[in-house]
Image (tube, helix red, strand yellow):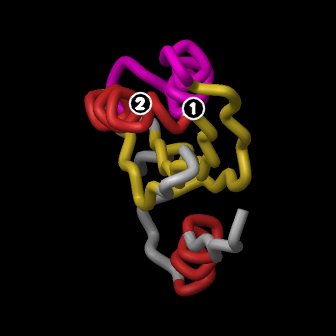
Amino acid sequence: MSVANVIGVLVHGARDRRAAIAEALAAMPGVEVHESFEDGRFVVVAEDVEGRYASDSLMAFNQIPGVISAALVFHGVDDGASSDQNQASLAAATKMETRPS
C-alpha cells in the first residue's frame, strides 16, 4: 500500500508578482493551486510525487521570487483509502473565506 503526505499551504506573495508566482507554482510537480486572490494569496495543495516530497515543495515555495511567506495549514497522510473524514479535512483546509483588506 502506498502512503503519501498531502499538505495545504497558504502562500502569500507580492501583488505585482501574482502572475509569475502562479506560473511557478503550477510548474511544480505534485502542486495544485486551488484558489488565488487579488491581494497575492494562494491556497495550494502539494503531495508527495516520485523524487519529491510535499515538504520539499513547501520549502521551494519560499524560493519563488515575490513570495513573502508560505504557511503550512494542513498535513494529512493519504494511505490510498478514501474516507469521508480525510476528504472533509482536506476540503476544509483548502477552503478560504475572503475578507475585505
Left or right: 72 in relation to 5: right
Residue 95 rendering spot, x and y as whole percentages: 57, 73
Q: Is residue 96 magenta?
A: no
Residue 55 rendering spot, x and y as whole percentages: 60, 28
Closer to the camera, 60 or 41? 41
Residue 90 rendering spot, x and y as whole percentages: 57, 68
Magenta-colored span: 49-66
Q: Nearer the viewer, mark 1 or mark 2?
A: 1
Q: Quadrant of the C terminus?
A: bottom right
In the picture as drawn, the residue positioned furthest to the bottom comes out as 84
Q: Residue 14, labelled with which disc?
A: 1
Q: Give the quadrant of residue 11.
A: top right
Amino acid type assigned to the residue bearing label 2 in the image: Ile
Q: Residue 28, labelled with which disc?
A: none
Task: Say which element carries label 2.
Answer: helix
Left or right: 54 in relation to 70: left
- The reply to whether callout 1 and callout 2 are in contact (CB within 8 Å) is yes
Asked if 56 appears above or below 44 in the picture, the reply is above
Separation of marks 1 and 2 at Cα, in angstroms: 9 Å
Q: Which badge, 1 or 2, is on the more N-terminal residue?
A: 1
Q: Is residue 65 magenta?
A: yes
Amino acid type assigned to the residue bearing label 1 in the image: Ala
Residue in the image at 73% along x and 52% along y? 73
Residue in the image at 59% along x and 48% along y? 7
Q: Give the quadrant of residue 69.
A: top right
Left or right: 44 in relation to 19: right
Residue 32 rendering spot, x and y as whole percentages: 36, 48
Closer to the camera, 12 or 100? 100
Asked if 65 appears above or below 13 in the picture, the reply is above
Q: Provide the residue designation for mark 2.
A: 21
Q: Residues within 10 Å of mark 1 (few under 14, many from 20)?
A: some
Residue in the image at 50% along x and 15% along y? 65
